[in-house]
Image (tube, helix red, strand yellow):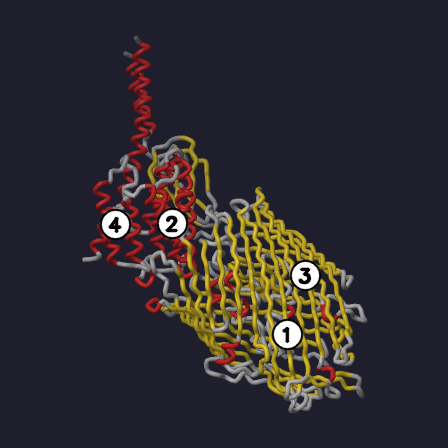
Amino acid sequence: MTKWVLALAMILFTCVLRAQVSVEGQVRDPRMRPIAGASVGIRDSYDGATTDSTGRFQFITSEKGNRVLQVSVIGYRKFEQQMEIRDLQITLDITLKEEVSELKAVVISAGTFEASDKKKGTVLTPIDIVTTASGNGDVTGALKSLPGAQQVGESEGLFVRGGTAQESKTFIDGTLVNNFFYSSVPNIAQRGRFSPFIFKGTVFSTGGYSALYGQALSSALILESIDIPEQSSANLGVTLLSLSGGYQHLSRNKKSSFGFNYGYSDLSLAFALIPQRQEYTQVPVYHNADANIRIMTSKTGILKYYGTFSNNKLAFFTPSIDTLGYLSGFTLKNTNMYHNLSWRENLGKGWRINAGASYSNNHDEISSGIFNQEKQEVLLGGLEFRNYGLDRKGIYVNGKLVLEKRIRGLNTLRFGGEYNYSEDQSDFSFWNGQVFPVAVRERLKSVFAETDVYITNALAAKIGGRYEHSDLLDRDNIAPRISLAYKTGKAGQASLAYGVFYQNPEPRYFPVPVPLRFSKASHYIVQYQRVTSLQTFRTEVFYKKYDDLIKTSLNGAQEIATSTEGFGDARGFELFWRDKKTIRNLDYWISYSYLDTERDFLNFPSAIQPSFAARHTASLVLKKFVTGWKMNVNGSYNYASGRPYYFILYNAQSGKNEFVDRGETIDYHNISFALNYLPSIGKKNPKMFAVYVLSVSNVFNFQQVFGYEYSYNGYRKEAIVPPSRMFVFLGAFLSFGVDRTEDVINNNL
Amino acid sequence: MNNRIWMTTFLMILCAGIQAQSDKYISAMREKVAMMEQTNSFEGWQQLANGFERIAEAEKKQWHPYYYASLCRVMSGYMLGNGRMGGFADKSDPEADKAEELLAKAVAIHGEDSETWCIRKMIATLRMSADPMNRFQTLGPKAVEALEMAKKLDPSNPRIYLLEGQDRFFTPEQFGGNKAEAKKLFEECLLKFDAFRPATAIDPQWGRSQANYFLTQFK
């Protein structure tokens, strides 16, 4: 019987043990701001509560003795504390530390514009690149409406912060692209060779970029190609300029894909409708073929191949500026091949590898001459140098390896090497048939290291360095790069960047009678930005110093390098404002750049504002999706203040280059609009997805002058204007999806 | 004899303990599952998600609390949107990430079924609605695919029709929305509910009141 009593006593005792205790308190961050929505509880029990908007919590527990209190909430480090539950009431004051996470951490953003839908804090999305009205569906087109880039219309490329187009380099999946644009044609800007649709990420750096990249004094355009597509599809494009078709195949298990496309462009129809300034004897004709293979090498790894082959030709006449009644003729044939292989993989233990290699081959056949009205080539006394031929072949091999190691949180170490081989062979044939062959071979070897250090969520630094050795120059350089970013509030952050950048003189200046150095630019950037999901404001102030720029003089009609004693600087400020909030359903951005730059390079008699640099540049870009019409309506206005122009001649008497004439062009205005009609949107399981595009550039027919061209003696000058004032593009792009939902489901079961 | 009494007592206490433990689990779960019916605010869903997660972490071997914690995270994410389309990805993505993490734990214990695919669908829709302009092309098909999987695994699951109906209901007509189709789907959902019996008191059974609510919107 006593045992029963004992048992009863035990049960009672247990009940006493289960007497309830109230636990209450407040959860705050280190700055004493309350944290709402945090889960506070006792480990291995159900007991707990969620903090309210003042960070307070209160719950009752029947647990006893030594227990662990746990506090967790998204964005903060998990908090655990030993606690003895004895009293009837426990009051706790808990401070949570912010988790250093990609989502909350400051972004090292000085000098960069990023278009991505994966990362936060990006200013653009990949769609923006193709829907910016003034962009004309060209990769770099949309970037010209961002601060820092010039509105140069007479030649291709990105002119950034007082830099030339050659100072901007493009990288695809990590490796350098040597002939990103179609070969230059006098006074007509060429397009990029690559379709914007093959890229999922774009980083446009207007300065202070990472040590992983080099050989660009001003700007790096870093493009990341798309991974495995969502589905198999066939596509067809019919435009005013071209016909194209392709097929993309996705394997059943969605682990690999391959595809190919072919496009044929012929500008005859467009030029018949839109009269051109040039008289074409061969309208531009392009053949483009590309192929891709993408294979997932693991859950996190992917191997990608992308290759293109293109061939194009054109020939035209313009009235000769040198002599009245004669014509100036220009023909170009280009064949280009590009192959890119890249691999990225997580190696485990925080290690990651990015490897890439590219091979390209470029062949230009150019001829230029003076022709009579019957279009027969003639040699005119004193103007023989205008008749020449150029056969230019280039072979480029680039390889790059980057290893990345995550060390606790977001802290990362990156290092690796790069190898660039180039072989430029050019045969210049003079009017008299004499051929002047030049071969320039360069091997550039680089190693680099960089670390991202997150001191807190609010303070981060990127510190790196790059070493390069050029066989051609037989020189080395070491380039330090440092960026700092500090978060000033929930959305605001301030950044600083400093970096030194080196670049080889262009191959066309080789061989040289004098030793040349790397050209050098030093960047200093201060940025403030405020980014919320619907609005972005950013402003940058920069100073850029150029040293060792190339100087040239004329040897007969040929421009030769005489030294790398050139110099210059650029300073300015830029503003960017993007807003998707204020006006319902309207997305717009405004950018403004102020640039004060002077340089003494090439044949300049002194340091002057170069002709590719406008003091004020501004853009307004509007985007609106009209749901009822299923139509994207895009508009843009680009402005640039007048640019200076010069005519410089060598004065034999003084032995110096002198200004014969100089002036400033009129301001540049361009209003463009584009309509994208997407009738397939909203159809359930559409078999076909169609996009119809109409775009018009320079809608109001503004007169645009890019500069002036002079006759050889400077007696005559003529405005450099676009080939046509207005341009209209019309096209239909159809994509036929192959629905594999069934396969996917069956594979998953 | 004494020994037998001892043993019996001991066993009784032990059994009572175990019984109490499982009763405690079931009753805690039932209470929270019932609360879901009355919850309609961000704070409310967060509180439930936290509560379910605490139970899940204490039990570790039960998939239900992870499943519900995930569901409540998605619901709190929906609340952030508050009827807007787009512009809240910075706030809702962490909720979606957390929901995915919790769902993965549920799947690790229980495997995939029609219900877990329904949650996958809801997560994809949450992510898409946070930034439709940039995400509809990738996440739209993903959501459709998840729902097809759910249907394939158990076409009698009423929640499939509720989710499908909501899609039709909220999507603008130009993008494939259709109120008449939505109405049919909600009615289909109720029919499925009439035939539906949850395996246990804490198995997924939510959705009837939502379907009823949507049907009142057509009157």
Secondary element at tag 2: helix
- How far is disc 1 from disc 4 in space, using C-alphas? 68 Å
Mark with earlier residue (3, 1): 1
Check the image and report above or below for A45 versus B12. below
The residue positioned farthest toward the top in the image shown: B1
Amino acid type, label 4: Gln
- How far is disc 4 from disc 2 in space, using C-alphas? 23 Å
The residue singled out by tag 3 in the image is: A396
- How far is disc 3 from disc 2 in space, using C-alphas? 44 Å
Q: Which mark is residue B165?
A: none
Which part of the image, by quadrant, shows the N terminus of chain A?
top left
Residue placed most toward the observer, A508 or A325: A325
The residue singled out by tag 4 in the image is: B210
> Within 10 angstroms of label 3, few (less than 14), some, or many (20 or more) residues?
many
Can residue B4 be seen? yes
Cβ atoms under marks 3 and 2 closer than 8 Å: no
Residue A481 x, y percent position in the rendering: 65, 59
Foreground disc of the pair 3, 1: 1
Which residue is rendered at x = 72% and y = 85% of the image?
A: A379
Secondary element at tag 1: strand
Amino acid type, label 3: Tyr
- How far is disc 2 from disc 1 in space, using C-alphas? 51 Å
Residue B38 in the figure: left or right of residue A738: left
What is the chain letter for disc 4? B
The residue singled out by tag 2 in the image is: B145
What is the chain letter for disc 2? B
Residue A511 x, y percent position in the rendering: 78, 69
